[in-house]
Image (spheres, rainbow, N blue to C red):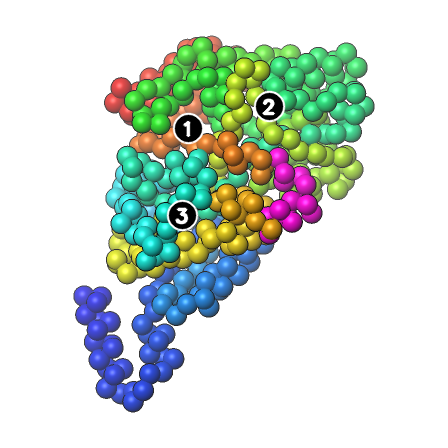
Amino acid sequence: MKKLKLFAAALVAASTLSSFSPLASAQEKTQVTFWHAMNGAHEEALTALTDKFNESQDKVEVVLENQGDYKALQQKVMGAGVSGDLPTMSQLTASTVVDFMDQGLTEPLNDYLTEENGFSQELLDDIYPGFMTGVTLDDQVYGLPFSKSVRVMYVNQDLLDELGVEVPKTWDDVKALGEKLDEAGKEEQAMGLENSISMEVETMARQNGAVWIADDKSATDIASDKATEPVQFIKDLIADDHARLAGEDGYMSGPFASGATALYIGSSAGLSFVLDGIKESGINVTTAEIPTFADGDPLTLFAGNDLGVFSQASDEEKAAAVQYMAFLLSTENTAEWAAKTGYLPITKSGEESDVWQNYLKENPLMEAASKELEYGRAQVPYVGSSEVFTEIETALETIMVNDGDVKENMQAIEDLVKGHLGL
C-alpha cells in the first residue's frame, strides 16, 4: 500500500510539474524516524551528525525525536509496539536488544548490511569485535553499536603520592593499598564501587578464568570457584573496611570526588561527574585501566547503547536506517561523536584517527578507556538476561550487605541462567 501511495504521488507530480524540482526530490526521500534518549550536549552532537548525514545525500532524511531518558524510551517503544505505531529505529540498551527481539519488535539486519547501504565488509572488520557480540544472537545481527563506554579506575593521585605507592595494577595491589591506608592511620577506603556491582563481578570472574556464560550459550559456571572467588574478595574488602559501595550517596562518583576513597571503578562516560565533583575538593585525579588478577588477562566489559531497526518499518526504511548507521560508524564520524560526548570510538580506524588522538592529547583522562578498547568484551546476550540481571543484583546485595552465603546465592543465579539457556 505504501509503495502504491508513493507511485501515485509520483504520477501526480509528473503531470503537474513540467520539470524536475526540489519539491519532487523531497517527496522521494525515504524518511527514517529515530527515537533517542540523548539530552544536553549529547543531543546537540547527535543533531549535528544527523544534519550532516541529511545534507550529504538526497535519498534519505532522518528525523530525530527525543523521548526523554532510557526508561521513558523503553516504555514508549513498548506502547508503540502494541499500537503498531513504532518509529523506524531507536536506541537500544543491552537488555532491550534481547527483549525487543524476543517480542518480535525487531528483526535481523543481516540482509541490509550491504555495500549498497554503505555497510561494507571493511567497515564490519573495522568495528571492535566485542561491540558486535552484544548485538548478535545465533549469528543474526539485531543492532549496531553506537554510544559505548567501559569501566575505568579513577585515582586520587594526591592520596597515593602521600602514601608513596604506585597506582594498583592487580586486585592484590588494591588489597595492599587498603592495608597501607590502615597503617598510615587514614580513614579513606582503598576502593569505591557503585551499588550495582554485577558488571564488576562478571569482569573479575572472567579475568579469573571463569567462562561465566559461554559465547554459544552451551555452558555457565557462575557458581564455580573461579567465579565466586572474586565475589568473596569484594566481600572481604568491604568487611575489612578497604572498600565501600555508594550506599545512600547513590553514585560513587560523588564520595570519590570529595576524597572518600583512593580509587573508584566507574563508567568512562561518568568522567564529567567526577570532574564536576573535584572542582570543590580540589583533589588531583588521574585514571588507569581496571585492575586484573595476577595470573589473568586484562578484560573489561562494554556498556552503553546500540541502535536497532523495528520490524514494522518498510524494506526501504530499513535500508535507509542502515545507511544512516553506517554513516555514524565512519572513521571521522565515530571519532567526532566520541570526542564530543565522552563515549568511545566504535572502530579501530576511529580510535587511531587524528580526531580522536588529538582529543586524547587534550583530555588525557580518557586514555585509559581508549586503551581498554582492544580487550573490551560484551556480555553474552540471551533471552531472560533481564530477569537474571535483577536477580543477581539482589543476590549480590544479600551477600555484601546482609552477609549472605556466597556459594549459595551464586548457585541460585547459575540455576536461573541454566533454566533460561535450557541447560
Q: Quadrant of the C terminus?
A: top left
Q: Mark 3 is on which residue type?
A: Glu
What residue is pinned by disc 2?
A: 291
What residue is pinned by disc 3?
A: 122
Q: Nearer the viewer, residue 142 or 350?
A: 350
Q: Nearer the viewer, residue 248 or 32?
A: 32
| Dot placed on the residue nearer the N-terminal end, 1 or 3 | 3
**Mark toward the viewer: 1 or 3:** 3
What is the distance, in whole Å, between disc 2 and disc 1 at their CAs? 26 Å
Percent position of residue 161, x then y: 79, 25
Q: Above or below — where is 333 with respect to 63?
A: above
Q: Quadrant of the N terminus?
A: bottom left
390 with respect to 158 (left or right): left
Percent position of residue 184, x then y: 79, 15
Identify the element where label 2 is drawn.
loop
Percent position of residue 135, x then y: 37, 39
Magenta span: predominant SS is helix
Q: Mark 2 is on which residue type?
A: Pro
* Residue 399 in view (yes/no): no
What residue is pinned by disc 1?
A: 390
| Dot placed on the residue nearer the N-terminal end, 2 or 3 | 3
363 in the magenta segment: yes
Quadrant location of residue 276? top right
What is the distance, in whole Å, between disc 2 and disc 3 at their CAs? 33 Å
Callout 3 crowding tier (Cα within 10 Å): few <14, some 14–19, many ≥20:
few
Q: Nearer the viewer, residue 195 or 169?
A: 169
* Part of the protein shown in magenta: 355-368
* Residue 365 in view (yes/no): yes
Residue contact between numbered discs 2 and 3, judged by CB atoms under 8 Å: no
**Mark toward the viewer: 2 or 1:** 2
